[in-house]
Structure formats: structure tokens, C-alpha cells
Amino acid sequence: MTSESVDWLNISNKTFIVTGGGRGIGKAIVDTLLASDAKVGVIDKDVEDIETITGRLAAQSADITDVNSIEQAAEHFQSTLGLADGLVNCAGLFSPGSISEVDLSEWDRVINTNLKGALICSRTFIKQMLQKGRGSIVHISSIAAHFPQTNSGAYSASKAAILQLSKQIAVEHGANNIRSNAVCPGMIRTPLSEPFYLDDSIRTARESMTASGRIGEPEDIANAVAFLLSSRAEYVNATEMVVDGGFEATPMHLVPRPGYNAK
Ligand code: NAD
């Protein structure tokens, strides 16, 4: 990214909160926002590796499902970085399980984290955005919201529900100048998905299912998020941005059709 394109976003000195900013996609979002001279507050269960920068980068160890610790984090960020201009709900988790055998406490844990955690963080930071008179919230959903990710317990259901949560926030708070959008990442290489890439043949098979012919990097998602947070996306509201290298467009191409499939 050139310095000119960084300036184009015009987010310097704005304050953004990123949940799950300790690693993977969330960390890339934090780094991208910092590179644009924004101020960033990170909420993660694990913030050990984050070196805070006074007045620029603050981190709080907190579980997004714990209302009190999220409210404490919000107070801390308000006093160290100022009122929030935006929030990225990125913290999320994944747990295996088929529909007929999924452990119900695991189902609850995934819904609690991926959906209720996003609600708790949204309403906590909406209070600051109301004081500020504007705001932007970006929820990290998934292509699994559109396609059932089998044997993955509540993951797809939680990610589909986030899309509706995002729209409800947008409609309830549009009049307050607060926008809410979702990003649906495709296959992105992060610590969470790393086990899928240990075998080269599986990586190649996955790459061939994208129009772009590659697996996404966390920065691919971070760039879309930075745009949605910025005032460049002022009229983008209550929508979903799929960032998947064209994965969602490939099924017909992959259907065996003798005489029509590429050699
Ligand atoms: P990751 O596991 O590498 O990082 C997730 C971060 O969230 C970790 O730092 C973890 O400590 C934190 N976290 C988890 N639960 C938390 C909680 N209750 N409270 C506070 N922090 C918590 O995952 P990732 O691959 O970077 O995924 C980030 C988001 O993107 C998730 O919501 C995931 O569902 C979504 N996503 C990922 C992919 C992919 O291919 N990696 C694809 C689509 C969507």
C-alpha cells in the first residue's frame, strides 16, 4: 500500500476497537489501522504478545462474553485513546460436531462467543458512538454463513445470525449516524485454519476452489474492514461484503460437465 492510498482512508487519529486483535485476522486489522495512523484498542483473551504504545495502541485481556470486563475495557480505552469511532467484532471460535451428535454445551459456547459476544461488544461501544455522534461497526462473519459448514457444530448458524444482528444494529441506529456492516471472509490462512494447510495437496485443492487461485491472507480482510470503518464507506450500511477470492462463484465451474470442463 502506498502512503497516498493510506491517506485516502482518512482515519488518522480515529479510535477503533478490535476484538480478537491478538492474532490472525484481528491482528492484521490492528496492524492495518495503525499503519493508517489510527488509534487502536485491542480486546482479546490473550494479549501477552501485544506491546502497547502510549496514546496509540492499548490492549485489554477480556472475554467478549463477560459484560463487566468488556465495560471495564471500554472505560480504559475511553480514557487512554478517546471515545470509539468504530468497532470490529472479530473474536470468534470454531468447534466441531455433527448436527445429530454435537455436544450441546459446545453449541452454546460457540453461539455465546460468536453471536452474544458480538452483541455485548456492540452495545457497549454504541454508547460511546452515541456520545460521539457517529460510528461504524464491522462484524466478521464468514462464507459459512451462506453455505452450511458441515460437522462444525454451531459455527454456520452463529455466522448467519451475525449477518442479521449487523442489519438490526444498522436499522436501529442509522438515525444516530452509526453504520453496521459485515465482512464474510473466505478461506484465510491464520493460526485457526493452519491445520488445513499442513498438507500441500489439500492446500492446492482448496486454492482451485477460488476464482483467484489462492488462499486469502489476513491482510485481504483487513483492507476491506479499514474501508468499511472509514468515512469513504459513508453510504455503505447494513450490507455484507464477501472477501473470498471468488470462492462463492465457482460451484458451476466445478460441476462435472463433459465437453465443457476446462482441461
Ligand atoms: P484465530 O483463532 O487465529 O484468532 C481469533 C482471536 O480471537 C484469538 O486471538 C483469540 O484469543 C480471540 N478470541 C476467541 N474467543 C475470544 C473471546 N471469547 N474473548 C476474547 N477473545 C477471543 O482466528 P482467525 O482465523 O483470525 O478468525 C478471526 C475471525 O474470522 C473469527 O470470527 C472467524 O470465525 C472468522 N473467519 C475466519 C476464517 C479463516 O479462514 N481463518 C474464515 C471466515 C471467518
Image (cartoon, grey):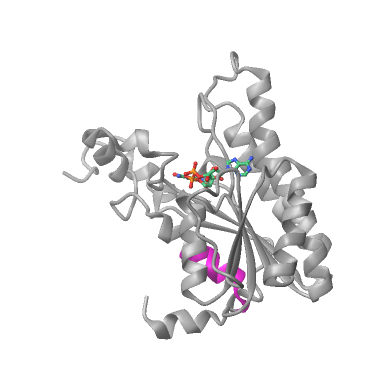
User: Is residue 160 visible in the rendered structure shown here?
Assistant: yes
The residue shown at (55%, 44%) is: 46
Residue 226 on image: x %, y %: 53, 68
The foreground one among 112 and 167 is 112
**Vertical placement of 147 versus 100: above or below?**
below
Q: Nearer the viewer, residue 60 or 133?
A: 60
| Residue 237 lies within the magenta run | no
Give the image location of residue 20, x and y in percent: 57, 49
The answer to which quarter of the image holds residue 2 is: bottom left
On the image, the x and y values in percent for residue 229 come to 61, 69
Question: What is the residue that sits farthest to the top in this orientation?
Answer: 101
Quadrant placement of the C terminus = top left
The residue at 52%/69% (across/down) is 33
User: Residue drawn at (33%, 45%), measured in percent from left and top?
Assistant: 253
Quadrant (top left/top right/bottom left/bottom right) for the N terminus: bottom left
Q: Nearer the viewer, residue 108 or 247?
A: 108
Q: Residue at x 70, y 54 (%)?
A: 166
Q: Main secondary structure of the magenta part?
A: helix
Q: Is 104 placed above or below 64 here? A: above
**Is residue 179 in view from this perspective?**
no
| Magenta-span inclusion, residue 226 | yes
Rendering quarter of residue 123: bottom right
In the image, farthest residue toward the left = 263
Residue 186 vs residue 182: left or right?
left
Q: Position of residue 221 (x, y in %)?
A: 47, 58
Residues in magenta, as a range: 223-231
Residue 261 relative to residue 118: left or right: left
Q: How many marks?
A: 0
